[in-house]
């Protein structure tokens, strides 16, 4: 019998920022008992995933071993950690463990998909242990930008792992637990062999700043405003939502939340007792009755999402409110790389309305939820691991993080999605490369990123589409003329002629000369017609469109 | 007869950064003689203009008045100022005026389109005047990030305009003319009534930095490198190209340019005598023969463009060169908002190869070519205009610029594309709103942005496409079954069934029940089939695809 081993396998989140999904296993090779940490999503973009609703890790490897999964642990309630629970749980089927607030959010995801929310168990943090096969797991509270974020202390037969998840060092986070240095040092004293760790801000050289540093600047800003004030922040950043709300209240304004995510988060946090001290809230229709200098809106849409409240407000009237000259709109947030154009569109929309727009002003109105470089080093010093595995970063972040760990004398390397490690000893040994990838939620269906569906859509978007129809009679002779329907293509070519007519002329010529062998053979005919269409289009408009050829054979009818 | 008036009409570049195109006119209303300043392009993006090659201002208004155009003036050789010359000139047909280097670039654009390059006249700068109907125009040399950039001093019967174009205050630009404060003060002394002015960096509070500030940090960086060094910068920034090349030379490296734009620019600048002191260059194949620590590559692709040299190098072997661990890649550039993901992809590609990647490090390796806020104020002080019209900016930039001008006691306001001003007096009076927009170069064809072609492509990308074919006999009865071809859609639905079969079943059911009136009427049948397909798809996959319906009637054959 093979000896037991400890394995680690990132399926998502290692080599990218988003769709976190990590696996730990212990047991004889090929029979390890497994735990899963986080089931997150990534958001699609027009350039590489048009029409897609959500992106998540391909968990086929796990699904094939579902009988070996001892539990799924969710570290916190951000979408890139919990967002795929409703879509992926049916493939895995194991019990989900989380702290109460996160558990509520996970249950919401299951219920949305018509699943039984009772598979989620809520747990108290350290010192409680959750048993999961060969593992015991403790939720270790840390500060981040959503309450109840936890590292996971994973006890294995060959030493302890601290799964670092997302964190920042914040001793005064306002809402959610403060950074507890004593507790983390104690964990370090107890002995942690392996630390897996957030790499998001590895390139930021200065120590992170506390959420509480924002209260004064935001209050001053709101106090000095004359018209309506609206601010957007991440709905899950409840400390920020409260800071904004209190700034409004202090300035004698009634506070109104806009956007579904904002209301859901505040409600869930209030119900789970996490959010106290929120000013009273009023409904949008009631806020619309007040003088504008008595209103403070807190809205969704930090990333310029077209349907979010911020974008709606930037385009005009929304829920009875219309911002105008003299009003102020604050982005108490950062723009996630790739969303710059969308955010800029919203800013310019407000500018056109005469609204003063402020971004975070280089950190005055926003702080990051992730540990900066010195904060990561501070964690090393508390935990004193022997091995550091960088997580939660693009390749360049992981590489820099591994380099940093190396300078501290720690064993470290870049480990990306699909690299299964054997961590039985203090070495980073790749035991096996697992095929990984992405799954898309597309409408109501899950499809593989490499199925070709989205690739075809991108081609349609770049090249346009031509449908060609040919009817052949019982003797395989063309009945009437072939015709072409265009979509997403210029109606006329460079020389001014009609494109579909030019294609039809070329097709008529081709069909007039085509031999019986071609006309008899669907595949051959399809290929030849496609070539005629693409060549003619190239000459006429300088573009080769996608082509669907429909051959109707009366013989087959 | 109506009195003479001075008009100003931005057709592109006012309310956006890109595709600059401005019109000035003088004469009786409706019969003004016109000059055009700049014919630039904007680059497309997948999100709003998939498949498009270039974007430029819709010059229909000008084309309808082509007989009134006295000349086209190009201020400098950046693509957003000269890039549309080859595509738009045929609509305008007037003589093009520019300084020699810019003229060469404009001629290149014309030749690429098979046009006569002799319509371009090269001019010496101030004190030479170019006569153009009621106007006299002087090219006023200023510093920017490409040599021979000029403001235009436009003399009109009702006072002088300084068309500010792009500029920065750089007293030691290296290549290209230095900021000449004395000359600009002299122009101010002569009297300028209206200043139209760059707004790109209006939000940057500190004075701009000189190009020459980069020589030392870049030299140090290259001197300290052990492996191969490659750097990318904007090909038109010849000062930077030379700084990089000299840093390579000083470190004992042979310098090699990669990328067509890079070679074209350096060649044009050398031929026009603008670029002296460049180290000798070697060809990529010769550089490949040298030890890697003896090579310095200067390459195109600052924005992560997929086919540019930087992206090619990040993916592996390119022109005989393969970067690897120990090598260094420098982005001596900034990422234009919207290109973050593409640039990041290139950075991560290099990271995977083990190459150390540096961005501009907060300005250490790059300076902007545009005037910052205090620089703009310095220009006010030299020119002392009465009216300031912000140009070259998004709405938020123009608004902030107008506000700044206001604080200096100057007449100013936000003037965006299509707002025709009467500037006969020191007031910003909108005389008329002109319909403006964008033209797309799509393959080899110019199409209007609102023609619907690109909108259809976006729909195809978001929703996928279904082709439905129905054959009807002489009596309008379906011959055989309708069938569906999918493109860009999942093959199977939520319940696991085949999507095209589900659609075909629904169509069979519909056709079996369809009344004669529907079957007889193409439009009615088309609409009904479309509805069936979209409804079935919504149920099966949660998405409503685009549909092309092809009805073949044998009666018509």
Image: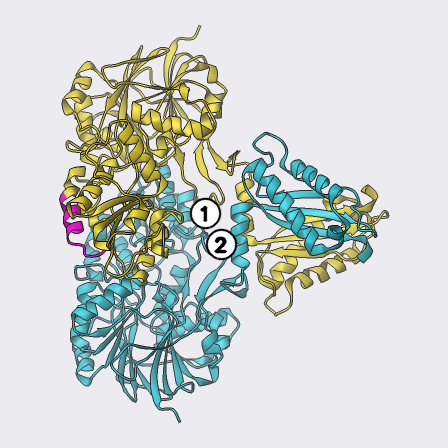
Chain colours: A yellow, B cyan
**Up/down of A352 relative to A272, above or below:** below
> Where, quadrant-wise, is the C terminus of chain A in this rendering?
top right
Write the residue at 19% across / 85% down.
B190
Depth check: B197 or B3 in front? B3
Q: Are marks 2 and 1 on the same chain?
A: no
Q: Is residue A223 located in the magenta-colored stretch of the structure?
A: yes
- Residue A278 in sight here: yes
Write the residue at 58% across / 34% down.
B493
Q: Which residues are magenta?
A: A216-228
The location of residue B547, given as percent across then percent down, is 62, 49
Dot 2: few (<14), some (14–19), or many (≥20) neighbours within 10 Å? many
Write the residue at 28% across / 56% down.
B244
Write the residue at 64% across / 33% down.
B498
Magenta highlight: main SS: helix
Quarter assignment of residue A383 = top left
Q: Which mark is residue A46?
A: 1
Q: Which residue is mark 2?
A: B50
Depth check: A501 or A139 in front? A139
Q: Is residue B458 located in the magenta-colored stretch of the structure?
A: no
A278 relative to A235 in the view: left or right: left
Cα separation, mark 2 vs mark 1, equals 9 Å
Depth check: B419 or B243 in front? B419
> Where, quadrant-wise, is the N terminus of chain A in this rendering?
top left
Per the image, label 2 sits on a secondary structure element best described as loop
Tell which subunit mark 1 falls on.
A
Residue at the extreme right? A475
């Amino acid at each position: 019998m093979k000896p037991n081993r400890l394995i680690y396998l990132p399926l998502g989140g290692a080599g990218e920022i988003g769709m976190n999904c990590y696996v730990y296993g212990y047991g004889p090779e090929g029979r390890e008992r497994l735990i899963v940490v986080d089931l997150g999503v990534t958001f699609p973009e027009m350039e590489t995933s048009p029409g897609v609703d959500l992106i998540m890790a391909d968990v086929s490897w796990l699904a094939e071993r579902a009988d070996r999964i001892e539990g799924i642990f969710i570290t916190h309630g951000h979408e890139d950690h919990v967002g795929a629970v409703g879509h992926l749980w049916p493939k895995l089927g194991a019990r989900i463990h989380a702290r109460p607030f996160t558990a509520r959010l996970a249950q919401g995801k299951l219920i949305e998909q018509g699943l039984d929310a009772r598979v989620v168990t809520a747990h108290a943090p350290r010192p409680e242990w959750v048993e999961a096969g060969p593992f015991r797991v403790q939720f270790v509270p840390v500060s981040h930008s959503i309450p109840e974020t936890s590292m996971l202390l994973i006890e294995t037969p060959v030493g302890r792992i601290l799964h670092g998840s997302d964190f920042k060092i914040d001793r005064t986070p306002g809402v959610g637990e403060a950074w507890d240095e004593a507790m983390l040092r104690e964990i370090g004293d107890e002995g942690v062999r392996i630390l897996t760790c957030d790499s998001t801000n590895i390139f930021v050289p200065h120590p992170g700043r506390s959420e509480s540093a924002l209260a004064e600047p935001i209050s001053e800003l709101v106090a000095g405003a004359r018209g309506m004030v609206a601010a957007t922040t991440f709905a899950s950043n409840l400390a920020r939502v409260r800071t904004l709300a209190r700034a409004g209240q202090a300035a004698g304004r009634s506070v109104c939340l806009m956007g579904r995510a904002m209301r859901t988060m505040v409600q869930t946090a209030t119900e789970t007792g996490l959010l106290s001290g929120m000013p009273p809230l009023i409904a949008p229709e009631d806020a619309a009755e007040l003088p504008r200098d008595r209103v403070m809106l807190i809205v969704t849409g930090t990333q310029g999402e077209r349907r979010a409240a911020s974008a709606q407000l930037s385009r005009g009237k929304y829920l009875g409110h219309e911002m105008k000259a003299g009003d102020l709109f604050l982005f108490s947030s950062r723009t996630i790389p790739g969303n710059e154009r969308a955010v800029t569109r919203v800013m310019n929309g407000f500018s056109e309305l005469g609204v003063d727009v402020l971004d975070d002003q280089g950190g005055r109105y926003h702080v990051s939820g992730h540990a900066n470089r010195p904060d990561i080093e501070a964690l090393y010093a508390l935990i004193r691991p022997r091995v550091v595995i960088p997580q939660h970063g693009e390749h360049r972040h992981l590489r820099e993080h591994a380099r940093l760990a190396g300078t501290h004398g720690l064993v470290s390397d870049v480990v990306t999605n699909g690299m299964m490690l054997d961590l039985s000893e203090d070495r980073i040994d790749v035991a096996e490369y697992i095929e990984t990838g992405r799954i898309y939620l597309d409408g109501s269906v899950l499809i593989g990123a490499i199925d070709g569906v989205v690739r075809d859509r991108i081609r349609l978007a770049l090249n346009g589409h031509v449908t060609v129809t040919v009817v052949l009679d019982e003797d395989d002779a063309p009945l009437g003329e072939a015709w072409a329907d265009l979509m997403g293509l210029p109606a006329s070519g460079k020389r001014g002629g009609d494109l579909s007519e030019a294609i039809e002329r070329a097709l008529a010529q081709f069909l007039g000369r085509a031999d019986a062998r071609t006309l008899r053979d669907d595949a051959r005919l399809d290929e030849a017609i496609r070539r005629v269409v693409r060549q003619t289009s190239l000459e006429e408009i300088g573009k080769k469109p996608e082509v669907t050829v429909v051959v109707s054979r009366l013989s087959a009818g």
